[in-house]
Each structure stands twice: as structure tokens, then as C-alpha cells.
Image (tube, rainbow, N blue to C red):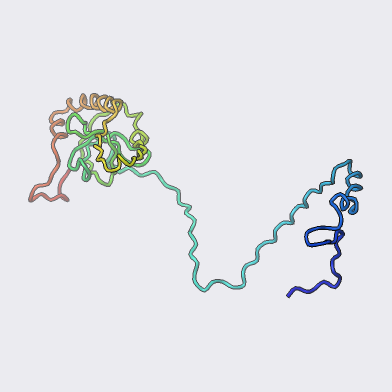
Amino acid sequence: MAAKRKTPVKTRNPDLIRGVGKYSRSRIYHKRGLWAIKAKNGGVFPRHDPKPKAPAAAEKAPKFYPADDVKKPLLNKRKPKPTKLRASITPGTVLILLAGRFMGKRVVFLKQLTSGLLLVTGPFKINGVPLRRVNQSYVIATSTKVDISGVNIEKFDDNYFAKEVEKKKKKGEGEFFEVEKEDKKKLPEDKKEDQKAVDASLIKSIEGVPDLKAYLAARFSLKSGMKPHELVF
């Protein structure tokens, strides 16, 4: 229990009845001498700036620690390094795709992007493989090379292949049960033109090498009795 005061606090305005004081507000104003304080400071009550807070003392280490080990996340100071390109993959190298939609197709390597992925193309007119990005883990590099010095690939980067995020439309009560027909996404015209420009430059150099066009159009596959580790690509 809290200790009782020895001298009771006296109020300047005792209650006549509960909630009703003996003196009015103006009477208490003069009784407290507020008018003198105001007159002394040019008709305005003085304002005192708050005292600056004392600097917080350094936290002491606790005397006790929890019985269970508290896991703290470790700081990750690792800086991502650019993906190292295989020595066998150079601009113009014909690659064989090992996974994905175009598995088994032969493509021409154009350049490595900032993300570490490889920019390749069929060309599209020969085997149907468009400009796309692939991981070098899922390709086999062959000894065949194509001259790509006349191909302009400066505009192609990771942002070129970024997908546009579409906002979902809210359905009303009437439209909730209706089955909407999904429209097929059409490729933008500018990307079609880019593909044609790349194909035109590549096909010129491909046609200059005998049997190279048929080689790129043929799909790679293994037959019975073939040993992959003994093949020379």
C-alpha cells in the first residue's frame, strides 16, 4: 500500500457541494496571481523549452540467458557473381536443347545476357525456334559454328523478354457464373519484325555453308546402340 501523506493537501477552491467550487474561475485567476505573471511577460504566459533528454545509458548484458537457443539470422555478405560461360560456348555456336518445349532442336547461340542466360534462335524460319533465353545447363555445345557478325543483337536484353502484368477484372454477380473464353495472346508486331530481321541476317550466312540448313532443321535424337558418352558433337 502507498504511504499516507502526513499533511493533507489544501485546495484554494474548496467544494461547497460535490462539483461546485466556492470561488468562480475569474476569482481563482486573481487568487493564483496569474495576472501578475502575464503582465510581467508582456501579456503572454512564459513558455519554457523542454530540457534536452539525457543520453540513454548503454544496455547492460543480462545476467541470465534463455535455456533454449534463440536462432538469429546470419548476415548474408555474399555478392552475386556473373555466371561464367562455358569455354565451349562462343557466339555462333550451334547448341542442342535438352529440355523444354523445343527439346532436341538445334539452335544458334547469339550472346549471354546479364542474368547469365543464353540468347538463342533457331532461326525461326528453319526449325521454328524463336528468339528465347535458355540456361546453359540444359544445352550441349557442338563443334559447328555459324558466322553471326552481320546480326544486330544490341537491343536484346532481359527486359526485352519480361512479361507484362495484367490486372484481373472484377466480376459482377451476373458475370460470376459465365464462362469467359480466353483469348490467345498475340505476339506484338515489333517482336515479329525483330525476329524477321535476325532470321534474315542468319539465313544468309547459313545458306553459304553446305548442308548446314538441313542440319539445323533436323531434330537430335538417340537411337538404340548409340552411346552418348562416345559421341562427338
Res. 92 visible in picture? no
- Relative to 133, is 215 on the left or the right? left
Residue at the image position 91 percent from the left and 44 percent from the top:
39
Of 219 and 148, nearer the camera is 219
Res. 182 visible in picture? yes
Residue sitting farthest toward the left:
224
Q: Is residue 58 above or below residue 180?
A: below
Place of residue 56 in the rendered image (x, y in percent of width and height, measured from the top left)? 70, 58
Q: How many numbered callouts?
A: 0
Quadrant containing the C terminus is: top left
Quarter of the figure with residue 59: bottom right
Residue at the image position 41 percent from the left and 46 percent from the top:
81
Place of residue 5 in the rendered image (x, y in percent of width and height, measured from the top left)? 82, 71
Place of residue 86 in the rendered image (x, y in percent of width and height, measured from the top left)? 30, 43
Quadrant containing the N terminus is: bottom right
Of 132 and 147, nearer the camera is 132
Of 78 and 18, nearer the camera is 18
Residue at the image position 32 percent from the left and 29 percent from the top:
153
Place of residue 98 in the rendered image (x, y in percent of width and height, measured from the top left)? 21, 45
- Relative to 119, is 29 on the left or the right? right
Quarter of the figure with residue 133: top left
